[in-house]
Amino acid sequence: MRALMQDKPLLISSLIDFAAQYHSDSEIVSRTVEGPIHRYTYVEAQARSKRLANALQRLGVELGDRVATLAWNGYRHLEIYYGVSGMGAVLHTINPRLFPDQIAYIANHAEDKYIFTDLTFVPLLEKVAPSLTTVKGYVIMTDEAHMHETTLPNALCYETLLAAESDDYDWPQFDEMTASSLCYTSGTTGNPKGVLYAHRSTVLHSFAVCMQDVLGLSSRDTVLPVVPMFHANAWGLAYAAPMCGAKLVMPGAAMDGESIYQLVDEEKVTMSAGVPTVWLMLLAHMQEHGKKLPHMDRTVIGGSAAPQSMIETFERDYDVTVIHAWGMTEMSPLGTTGVMKSKFAELPFDEQLEYKVKQGRVVYGVELKIIDDDGNDLPHDGVAFGHLMVRGPWITNGYFKGEGGEVLDADGWFDTGDVATLDGEGYMQITDRSKDVIKSGGEWISSIDLENLAVGHPDVAEAAVIGIAHPKWDERPLLVIVRNPGSDVTKDAILQYMEGKIAKWWMPDDVTFVDEIPHTATGKIQKISLREQFAGYKLPTADAAE
Ligand code: AMP
């Protein structure tokens, strides 16, 4: 029997319409690339998105066409989110931290028709533009006063484009499975691959973000997404904030500790989200200047494992609850978040930490399981670890244009490439990326666990662990460390600090110091480059074994 319920498609345009109608005085505050702070409300954001939709129509953009952005988090980027997807075109958010030839590759692969760019990225695009085969024109996201000479062909000024249009526009209604946006994964091997989101998956994911047990976003929040809008749609916050009418604070290009602190403090930010490296900068700034976070209630840390020392600092020194979160571009991105169950929240803080360092527990809508190398299901006992598989309505079923071939198994599970444990409460803990796990004597050592432990040492700024070939054990861990400025901490001191905190056979065979650890375009440690850098490295334990 079919239900008697209205079949109203879940469309992204409905999010901004709702915010404009019912949260008309909620603000969007942006630090602009031009300098000043810009401030307006959802009403103006909606009106300008509609102007943009009219402008895109006039430029010949049609349903399904790809329109790209190279932009920081800011109000114009938000208008493009809604204008492009709202009219039925596909918003392609390009990560400007990619190499120019990767940008050219993905813009050509996506067949972008127009590219919208912040002033910051005009020089980068000027270099890339001659290789772009489908782009008809470029829109520079500024006003006439800030436009300058450019070699970009068909360069238009964003504000001039909008000024010529009316905000009278009815969002078209279409199938909710229509593609809404496209985001390429940074791809640790081979070319980046495109994840193509739907209106439906995006709206469902936004509901999840707002759930109390997920990120609990509400109209009472002022949210600062430090995570970029070019990285998995700012973890869905650019959609979830209008869904609940939260005030949005956009940091623009300034991610340094002082700039982020200023926005958090002046705008009374209650909730924020970003990768651990960003929080390291904020914490360092606050520690140096004796600052506090009186308004902030919680912060979301994800993208890489949140070190225990960072969780402790936020919670103990600043009274900010850490929500450790895990997900991936292919998952819109949320899969697990670490909001405590009440029975754990009642535990003493030291015991809670055991759960807080885990990547959180499963979000309704996402199914998780772990399997061994032969595909057998492993128990959810918090001990057994295996390949983490996911399934759900906001998880990809294949990359754009079929790149990478079939990505689901016969039962529709997607292999995340992560190795993890799961427990009966739904808590998941990442052991490693399957490519990074260190295989020692037939057993696995988690590089993440060793890194997290090492960064807890007060003289360590950053740590990375890679497996080095070993004649007896196959691989053994090498710990690579960036010291804090002014520190001359030694290998022995580091190893002494780690001793007793992990199994003996997990102890690194060697520690080496570098000035810098390479990062990917999304801020993760680039293990591939590290492995290249240390190719042929001889561990001090190798000789004895030969
Ligand atoms: P991306 O698609 O760039 O967001 O990368 C997704 C990958 O980042 C995941 O598959 C994990 O390997 C890693 N990742 C994301 N969040 C976490 C986390 N909280 N802890 C450890 N790894 C994470």
Image: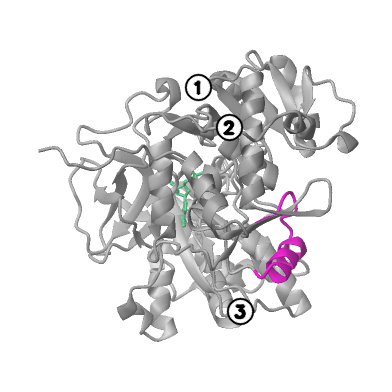
Closer to the camera: disc 2 or disc 3?
Answer: 2
Classify mark 1: helix, strand or loop.
loop
Earlier-in-chain disc, 3 versus 1: 1
Colour theme: one colour
Q: Amino acid at mark 2?
A: Tyr
Classify mark 2: helix, strand or loop.
loop
Q: Which mark is residue 318?
A: 3
Q: Which residue is mark 2?
A: 169
Closer to the camera: disc 3 or disc 1?
Answer: 1
Based on the displayed image, in which of its 4 quarters is residue 140 positioned?
Answer: top right
Q: Seen from this angle, which residue lies furthest front?
A: 168
Residue in front for this viewpoint, 87 or 187: 87
Q: Is residue 213 left or right of residue 294?
A: left
* As drawn, 455 above or below 98: below
Q: Which residue is mark 1?
A: 63
Residue in front for this viewpoint, 232 or 223: 223
User: Does the numbered disc 2 mark a residue whose Cβ is under 8 Å from ligand 1?
Assistant: no
